[in-house]
Image (tube, rainbow, N blue to C red):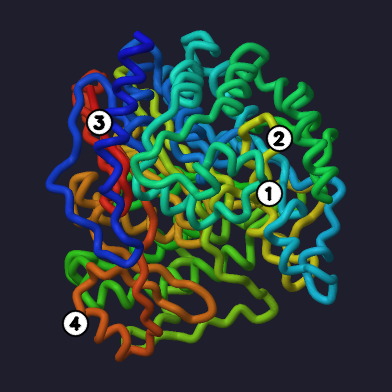
């Protein structure tokens, strides 16, 4: 079995080595979705997809497979997520017919001084990238919490594929080689030793072996999450933070808990759309859908200038709501009764000029454009359980701090706070929950998950998710086409990011209406859809993987 899995890793990575698109290129269109009768997995890396499928085939459920996938992504996408990271996980419990939101983002360290990230503090810009940007990692606690509550297989069995992949190595693809090259000069010497060869970063086709990470994953398999939150891995993190001058401390790790929350939802054209509540900042996605529900999409036409202008104005307003209303649910929760009401959508929609773009006005709320390097995956099993998870380290390789001997990259989560004005809800408040823009989502039909979808992309996440849902619901696209279709996104201060695939005529008309057009690739989404028999048993799964990345959707 071990030899078979290692051979599969080598074959898959060799196949992926030269498939990464350039950031500016239009994604290559994929002809149709993956299909399965027993389950579906879609992730940003083929090895992680195959690992998830191996757990499903072994009798595991979607929650077991999600742990396998997340741990494998730690190995094969080390720049994007892992034990030192955080994220947002939406799950569907088929037995009880309930959705739950698992917050894996942790709390801001108690010792944080938010003035460290603002002028006139010396080094304030560097502090948004270095050890002072490291927040409490919540990933390992969340993996264990999901396994304990919903899993069916042994914990140690779930981490086996990732341990083997880290120990035996995998072939570096073009995309990963590019990211290693971008960050290599910032790596500590002990990381450069295995992310490089003869002093230079690994290249496409080289083997990346992560013995330290394998040992850390093995320790996690043997000891559970306490290895990080109280054990020797946690002490190694604490020592690294002390050496580098970070705010994260051992006590923050001891205090960390994975928290379960009730999601939020709205009705959209007869379907229930479900997404995480605070502390995730996913509600702007629902605001967008609510405002777009007041127009006839077919009359406007998919990605027509009229449709794109309307969505651009809607998405700009919803962006403003994120800045104005995000908050820690224990301190100042978002006013969902207002934001998710039809009266609010009508009031705000009535202010849209169908011919001209409005300048973005944040008043006293300021923000910075960010580029968050994140990953998303979805998995569903034959019983109808579903997991949609957005997980990250923040920047590429997070803070680029790796406690020696662990192989674990630590996040730079605090870089994505909003620091002006001081004290705003998304500032770095010591001890409060870290807020995110993650929006893993379900669309329910007849009370069961029909669609599960999500994407990375920082502040563009909730914009991309809304467009994919409209593509399926309004324009009856299959899940692959819905993911592949060209997108737009508002970005501060007044940019409208537009993908290359949007026709030039539409771009010209948007510019003529006052939009400041900027060509950019948006997201790396993954999704699935489920069909049921009359008794509610899943009978067919379809899956989509974003052609903007090198991922794989595959069913069985």
- In this rendering, is residue 393 above or below 420? above
The answer to whether residue 469 is seen in the rendering is no
Mark 1 and mark 2 in contact? Answer it, CB < 8 Å: no
Q: Earlier in the sequence, mark 4 or mark 1?
A: 1
Kind of element beneath mark 2: loop
Q: Which residue is mark 4?
A: 505
Q: Quadrant of the C terminus?
A: top left
Kind of element beneath mark 3: strand
Question: In which quarter of the view is residue 120 placed?
Answer: bottom right
Q: Earlier in the sequence, mark 2 or mark 3?
A: 2
Please report the residue visible at 49 percent of the width from the left and 30 percent of the height from the top: 209
Q: Which residue is mark 3?
A: 554
Q: Position of residue 71 (x, y in %)?
A: 50, 28
Q: Spatial distance from mark 2 to mark 3, Cα to Cα? A: 36 Å
Please report the residue visible at 81 percent of the width from the left and 61 percent of the height from the top: 114
Q: Which residue is mark 2?
A: 404
- In this rendering, is residue 434 above or below 164? below
- Which residue occupies the foreground of this view, 177 or 386? 177
Mark 2 and mark 3 in contact? Answer it, CB < 8 Å: no
């Amino acid at each position: 079995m071990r030899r078979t899995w290692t051979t599969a890793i080598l074959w898959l990575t060799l196949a992926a080595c030269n498939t990464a698109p350039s950031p500016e290129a239009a994604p290559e269109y994929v002809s149709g979705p993956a299909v399965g009768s027993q389950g579906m997995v879609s992730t940003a890396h083929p090895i992680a997809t195959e690992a998830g499928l191996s757990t499903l085939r072994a009798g595991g459920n979607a929650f077991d497979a999600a742990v396998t996938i997340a741990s494998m992504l730690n190995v094969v996408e080390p720049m994007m997520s892992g034990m030192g990271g955080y994220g947002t996980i939406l799950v569907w419990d088929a037995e009880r017919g309930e959705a739950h939101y698992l917050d894996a983002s942790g709390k801001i360290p108690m010792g944080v001084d938010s003035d460290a990230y603002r002028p006139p503090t010396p080094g304030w810009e560097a502090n948004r990238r270095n050890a002072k940007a490291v927040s409490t990692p919540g990933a390992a606690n969340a993996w264990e919490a999901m396994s304990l509550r919903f899993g069916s297989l042994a914990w140690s069995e779930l981490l086996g594929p990732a341990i083997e992949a880290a120990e035996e190595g995998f072939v570096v693809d073009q995309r990963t080689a590019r990211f290693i090259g971008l960050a290599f000069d910032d790596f500590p010497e002990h990381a450069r030793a295995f992310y490089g060869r003869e002093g230079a970063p690994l290249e496409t086709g080289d083997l990346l072996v992560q013995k330290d990470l394998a040992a850390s994953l093995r320790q996690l398999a043997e000891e559970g999450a306490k290895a990080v939150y109280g054990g020797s891995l946690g002490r190694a993190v604490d020592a690294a933070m002390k050496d580098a001058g970070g705010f994260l401390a051992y006590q923050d790790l001891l205090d960390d808990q994975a928290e379960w929350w009730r999601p939020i939802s709205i009705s959209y054209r007869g379907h229930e759309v479900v997404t995480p509540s605070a502390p995730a900042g996913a509600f702007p996605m629902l605001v967008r859908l609510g405002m777009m529900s007041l127009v006839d999409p077919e009359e406007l036409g998919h990605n027509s200038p009229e449709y794109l202008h309307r969505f651009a104005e809607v998405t700009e307003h919803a962006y403003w709501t994120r800045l104005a209303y995000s908050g820690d649910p224990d301190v100042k929760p978002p006013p969902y009764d207002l934001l998710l009401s039809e009266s609010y959508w009508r009031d705000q929609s009535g202010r849209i000029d169908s011919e001209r773009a409005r300048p973005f006005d944040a008043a006293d709320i300021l923000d910075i454009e960010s580029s968050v390097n994140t990953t998303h995956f979805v998995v569903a099993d034959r019983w109808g359980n579903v997991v949609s998870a957005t997980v990250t380290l923040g920047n590429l390789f997070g803070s680029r701090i790796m406690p020696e001997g662990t192989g674990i990259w630590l996040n730079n989560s605090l870089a994505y706070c909003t620091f002006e004005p001081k004290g705003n809800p998304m500032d770095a408040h010591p001890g409060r929950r870290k807020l995110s823009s993650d929006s893993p989502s379900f669309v329910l039909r007849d009370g069961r998950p029909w669609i599960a979808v999500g994407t990375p992309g920082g502040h563009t996440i909730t914009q991309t998710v809304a467009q994919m849902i409209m593509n399926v619901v309004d324009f009856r696209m299959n899940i692959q086409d819905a993911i592949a279709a060209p997108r737009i996104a508002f970005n501060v201060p007044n940019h409208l990011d537009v993908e290359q695939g949007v026709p030039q005529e539409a771009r010209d008309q948007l510019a003529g209406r006052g939009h400041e057009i900027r060509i950019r690739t948006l997201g790396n989404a993954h999704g699935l859809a489920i069909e049921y028999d009359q008794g509610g048993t899943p009978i067919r799964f379809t899956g989509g993987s974003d052609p903007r990345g090198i991922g794989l959707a595959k069913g069985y």
